[in-house]
Image (cartoon, rainbow, N blue to C red):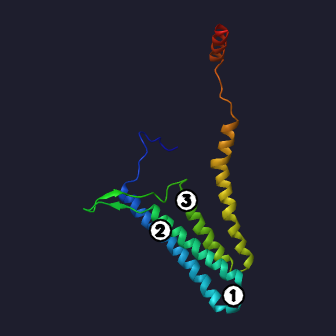
Amino acid sequence: MAPQQKGKQATKGGKQIVDENVATLKFYRNMAFISQGAHLMVMFLLSDAYSALTITMTILSVALHIGSYQFMSFMARAQYSESGALIDSGTDLNMEGGLAEHVKDLVILTSGTQIFSLLSNYFWLLFLLIPIRAVWLLWGSVIKPWMEQKNQQPEVDEKKQKKMERKMRRMR
């Protein structure tokens, strides 16, 4: 059994966040390049495999990779003072439950879809997971809580309820 930690949980320093963000961006950039390169190389070798679907989905894949990478690099952009001191380390791309986690999942899904699409064009259907996941997240974090909040009646304490009734009787 591990001893319980006393005090507050240790937080990451600004420089550590910047270094980890650089490593994360490099990893996902390399993942995108490798999947794009492998896909294009195989497609060039099998020049008869080009179809309108393949070209369209390849362009969509490239756009998703570029957009995802640009968005993550925008989130992780650090700000430095004129003297070179770190002012803001940017958003931590490795934070659990953050928006960057969903963007990283998108890069993984896009890369995997590209590689699997070399086996069959039916693997392009994996891109349908993107809107399904978006609707699921929207439902769970926005729509459902809003609907539940709207349906809830404010609970009034029994003592307060009796006090309000007495007040109403006095006013009559």
Please state if 126 lies on the left or on the right of 11 as rendered: right
Counting from the top left corner in percent of width and height, residue 83 is at 24, 62
Ranked by sequence position, the earlier of labels 1 and 3 is 1
SS at mark 2 in the image: helix
The answer to which image quadrant residue 88 occupies is bottom left
Specify few, some or many for label 2: CA neighbours under 10 Å numbering under 14, 14-19, or 20 or more: some
The amino acid sitting under disc 2 is Leu
Counting from the top left corner in percent of width and height, residue 55 is at 66, 82
Specify few, some or many for label 3: CA neighbours under 10 Å numbering under 14, 14-19, or 20 or more: some
The amino acid sitting under disc 3 is Glu
The answer to which image quadrant residue 122 occupies is bottom right
SS at mark 1 in the image: loop
Nearer the observer: mark 1 or 2; the answer is 1
Q: Residue at x 44, y 62 (%)?
A: 76
Q: CA distance from mark 2 to mark 3?
A: 12 Å
As drawn, 91 above or below 41: above
Counting from the top left corner in percent of width and height, residue 92 is at 45, 57
Specify few, some or many for label 1: CA neighbours under 10 Å numbering under 14, 14-19, or 20 or more: few
Ranked by sequence position, the earlier of labels 2 and 3 is 2
Q: Residue at x 58, y 71 (%)?
A: 64
SS at mark 3 in the image: helix
Q: Quadrant of the C terminus?
A: top right
Counting from the top left corner in percent of width and height, residue 58 is at 63, 79
Ranked by sequence position, the earlier of labels 1 and 2 is 2
- Residue 101 marker: 3
User: On the image, numbered disc 1 is attached to which residue?
Assistant: 50
As drawn, 73 above or below 99: below
Does the CB distance between marks 1 and 2 fall below 8 Å? no
